[in-house]
Amino acid sequence: MKDPRPTIGLSLLPAAAMWLASCSPTSIDGQAVGGRVCQGGASELLGDLPCGQFADFARIRLDDEQPAHAATRDIEIYRDPVLRKVSGYGQRVFVVLRLDDGTAHSSWVSCGRGTDKDWCGGDGG
């Protein structure tokens, strides 16, 4: 008689596949990005840096490039799928600003350089 209980390996397979899919990079605007971070708000830390620092830089850049843009509805921040730490405090992320008019503005933002936590630059710095 065949044992009706599924084997552990087969029963864990769907969960393992979902876990791997959530860890693998996705693509946004043609850019490979890692997992989403900073969902706890501006004061949440990414390494030693507050998440709001990355969002603020992206907002300032959008204001400079498109002064009359629609209001920001949501901000998404994703890890760099390859580069985790630049140097010292440095972190590089991909920021997506979702606007009220349905459009989105996305870009790479690096913050922290050596011992300077306050420095931020665009497109990887």
Image: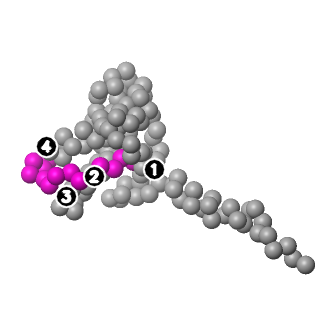
Give SS at disc 2. strand
Element class at badge 4 = helix
Q: Amino acid at mark 2?
A: Asp
Looking at the image, tell me whether mark 3 or mark 4 is earlier in sequence order: 4
Which residue appears at 75% of the width and 62% of the height?
A: 8
Q: Which residue is mark 3?
A: 100
Q: Is residue 12 magenta?
A: no
Image coordinates of residue 97 in percent, x first then y, are: 26, 51
Q: Give yes or no for contact between labels 4 and 2 (Cβ–Cβ under 8 Å).
A: no
Q: Earlier in the sequence, mark 4 or mark 1?
A: 1
Q: Quadrant of the C terminus?
A: top left
Residue at image x 90%, y 78%? Answer: 1
Disc 4: which residue = 64
Left or right for 80, reference 64: right
* Mark seen at residue 74: 2
Dot 1 alpha-carbon crowd within 10 angstroms: few under 14, some 14 to 19, many 20 or more:
some
Observer-nearest of 119 and 30 = 119
The circle drawn on residue 35 is 1
